[in-house]
Amino acid sequence: MWTWFHKLSSPPHFYRLSGTMIPWFGWLAAALIIPSLYAGLALAPADYQQGDGFRIIYVHVPSAMLSLFVYMFMATAAAIGMIWRMKLAHAVAVACAPIGASFTFLALATGSIWGKPMWGTWWAWDARLTAELILLFLYLGYMGLRAAIDDTNRADRASAILALVGVVNVPIVHYSVTWWNSLHQASTLLKKGGPSIPPDMAIPLYGMILGFLCFFGAVSLTRVKREVLVREQNSKWVKDMVTSK
Amino acid sequence: MTARQQRMLIVVLVLAGVGVATTFGLRAFQENLLYYYTPTQVQAGEPPLNRKFRVGGLVVPGTVGNEPGKLEKTFDLTDNGAMVTVHFAGILPDLFREGQGIIAHGKLNDEGVFYAEEVLAKHDENYMPPEVAESLKQIHGEEPSQ
């Protein structure tokens, strides 16, 4: 297991491996998202109360889930980078931040668009909404902190601590709807006693969630590849690769 | 202890420290984090006096009354325990209906009537097609939500 781990952490090996994995993730994402989107927007029945307005969940729920998943992924990578002094892990964390921020923004924006007709307001200072907004600021703060420090090693260490401190917000976002009376409804899929949504509405949603995960895989690996090239620009393998082409 | 183990310990301590601090912080501000009070809490006198707050509950069927020619409406909210009468003059959200979860923002007057300035509809986590809702309604003789 450890030899595998060490091999993965070698930048040239990772660079080649991610190059072969990106198309897989990319095509899988397309194969999941396109039919799920069609099924969700056209085939699934309308909701008994919200009508067609409920269909925004096919973007809102996957983005919100990914916004938390990407944060945990980023913080784990940052912790590995810090503990094992693995530069590749820091590169992964750096690559994740803007993607996570985009998912968070998408979750907030789609939620707001849904909230206006359904709740009667674009925004409320509700525990779930506020915690998700803090998540966006954590991502932006992480990116801002890195941009402010010129030395890569110092930026890695400082931003890893910020990412770790922010982990506390993840359970708050997730449990905000059960801990406090909130305007936001509780979770439909991760509910005690099973999801309260019929299969013809739920299956496209699961497809979208998996599709978003694969999309994250493709985009993050592409970004890690670029980050590795920038960080290893003076190393022999990068020079060899560039001159051999 | 190796340097690596030391760093591992630092990561664990950072997570634990921030976690404990946040837990205490959230417990201290518990009251401010509640988006709304339930009618039972209102009856027990928990919400602050002479200040605006929110009350949330289900609209009691048959209590929605509006005088003809006027925008003003009154309705009762319940959490299946206590009840609060809400008075509101304004436009209600689309999801407002009998049996629906509602959150009203306003003040309680001396007679115990809640004068709302804003009414929001709370949506629940249940999704279903209209036909299913219709057949559930026929079986149970009531709205399937909540």
Image (cartoon, rainbow, N blue to C red):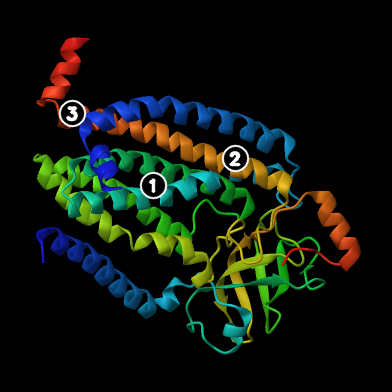
Taking the image as shown, residue A240 lies to the left or right of residue A133, namely left
Looking at the picture, tell me which residue is in the foreground, B26 or B113. B26
Identify the residue shown where x is 12% and y is 40%: A152
Look at mark 2 in the image and give the residue it sits on: A207
Where disc 1 sits, the SS reads: helix
Where disc 3 sits, the SS reads: helix
Look at mark 3 in the image and give the residue it sits on: A230
Image location of residue B90, percent across then percent down: 65, 60
Q: Chain of mark 1?
A: A
Q: Chain of mark 2?
A: A
Asked if residue B38 can be seen in this view, the reply is yes
| Type of amino acid at the residue the image marks with label 3 | Val
- Total labels: the figure holds 3
| Type of amino acid at the residue the image marks with label 2 | Gly
For the residues labelled 2 and 3, say whether their Cβ atoms are less than 8 Å apart.
no
For the residues labelled 2 and 1, say whether their Cβ atoms are less than 8 Å apart.
no
Tell me the number on the disc at residue B103.
none
Category of crowding for the residue at label 3, using alpha-carbon neighbours closer than 10 angstroms: few (below 14), some (14–19), many (at least 20): few
Asked if residue A93 can be seen in this view, the reply is no
Identify the residue shown where x is 34% and y is 30%: A18
Look at mark 1 in the image and give the residue it sits on: A70
Label 1, label 3: how far apart the Cα atoms are? 22 Å
Against B35, residue A222 (above or below) is above
